[in-house]
Image: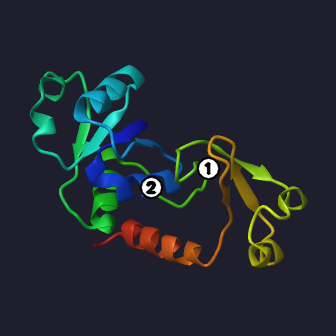
Amino acid sequence: MKFIADVMVGRLAKYLRMTGNDVMYINDIDDDQLLKIAAAENRIVITRDTLMLERREFKNGSLKSIFIKDDKLVNQLKQIKSELKISLKPNLTRCLVCNGLLSKVEKLDIKGKVPPYVYKTQNNFLFCKKCTKYYWRGTHYENIKNIFHIVNRAND
């Protein structure tokens, strides 16, 4: 499944990327451009915009959408998981910034390209060729895991 998220759900787009999902997000795109991309690339539109969903592309079924009902991230993720029956677990395979695919890089190859403390304390690194961003599992990873733990709890 491929998604395109409108400006109202940028944080959700980032977290869906954390799970390995292909989520296009352009924060300054207008609705016409967004719908054009969704149609051309067969992407599901994720939105909180009720007016957008009144457009003929959604009414006639030529485009699929998910209307996000809640403004809280955890509830948004739960809704996506429930409606699409997909697994949502942290799986860093996509860049959180540009949605590009990440590849493993050797530690020796990135000396001087990440902060010295990170280089000293981490052993596994990922790299986005598209936007040249590096990733590693820092202290923030526990927070990310906790969010997905809440999303995946059976009875909530």
Name the residue beneath numbered marker 1. Answer: 93
Q: Position of residue 57 (x, y in %)?
A: 18, 24
- Number of dots carrying numbers: 2
Residue 140: quadrant of the picture: bottom right
Height in image: 153 above or below 1?
below
Q: Are marks 1 and 2 in contact (CB under 8 Å)?
A: no
Q: Is residue 9 left or right of residue 147?
A: left
Task: Give me the C-alpha separation between circle 1 and circle 2.
Answer: 12 Å
Q: Is residue 91 left or right of residue 28?
A: right
Residue labelled with disc 2? 14
Q: Which of pointers 1 and 2 indicates the residue nearer the eye? A: 2
> Which residue is nearer to you in this view: 77 or 105?
105
Q: Residue, x 30% and y 29% (percent of image)? A: 33
Per the rendering, the mark at residue 7 is none
Q: Going from the N terminus, do you reach mark 1 or mark 2 first?
A: 2
**Residue shown at the point (39%, 39%) measured from the top left:** 3
Q: Secondary structure at mark 2?
A: helix
Q: Is residue 12 above or below residue 35?
A: below
Q: Is residue 108 left or right of residue 100?
A: right
CA neighbours of label 2 inside 10 A, class few (<14), some (14 to 19), many (20+): many
Residue type at mark 1 is Thr
Which of the 4 image quarters holds residue 124?
A: bottom right
Asked which colour scheme the image uses, the reply is rainbow
Which image quarter is the C terminus in? Answer: bottom left
Which structural element holds mark 1?
loop
Residue 50 sits in quarter: top left
Question: Which quarter of the rendering shows the N terminus?
Answer: top left
Residue at figure coordinates x 22%, y 52% from the top left: 68
Looking at the picture, how far across and down is residue 115, in whole percent? 74, 71
Residue drawn 20% across the image and 61% down it: 70
The amino acid pointed to by label 2 is Lys
Q: Position of residue 125 (x, y in %)?
A: 75, 60
